[in-house]
Image (cartoon, rainbow, N blue to C red):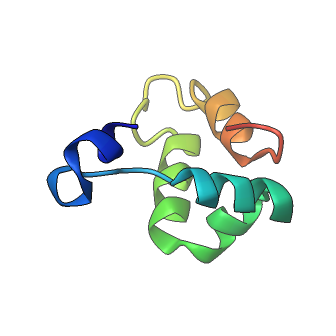
Amino acid sequence: EMAEEVGQDNIFIFGMTVEEVEKRHREGYRAREFYDNNIELRQALDQIRNGYFSPENPELFHDVVNSLLCDHGD
């Protein structure tokens, strides 16, 4: 709606369009495929899972990573 008001040249859209979201829902969402096919994403999640950002408690973010990698998560 905002893009319609200000015009496509005057707005920066980040994330997916409505059409892209609908396509993703039709095709199915497989979080593990993104992890497997994107080295930067995989490295970041592996660092989080391995305690790089929480050395005093390496398991602190395990649930976050597990949630991100499940197919019914977001």
Q: Which of 11 and 28 is in front in this view?
A: 11
Residue beneath the point at 43% across and 32% down: 55
Instruction: Tell me which corner region of the image, top left, top right, bottom left or bottom right, holds residue 62.
Output: top right
Q: Residue furthest front?
A: 5
Q: Where is residue 69 in the image (x, y as percent from the top left)?
A: 72, 48
User: Which quadrant of the view contains residue 8?
Assistant: bottom left
Give the left or right position of residue 33, taking residue 14 as reference: right
* Residue closer to the observer: 70 or 50: 70
Residue at image x 39%, y 36%? 53
Q: Is residue 67 visible from the viewing direction of this image?
A: yes
Q: Of 33 and 64, which appears nearest the observer?
A: 33
Q: Is residue 28 among what the camera can see?
A: no
Along the horizontal axis of the image, is 64 left or right of 11?
right
Residue at 51% across, 73% down: 39
The N terminus is located in which quarter? top left
- Write the residue at 27% across / 40% down: 5
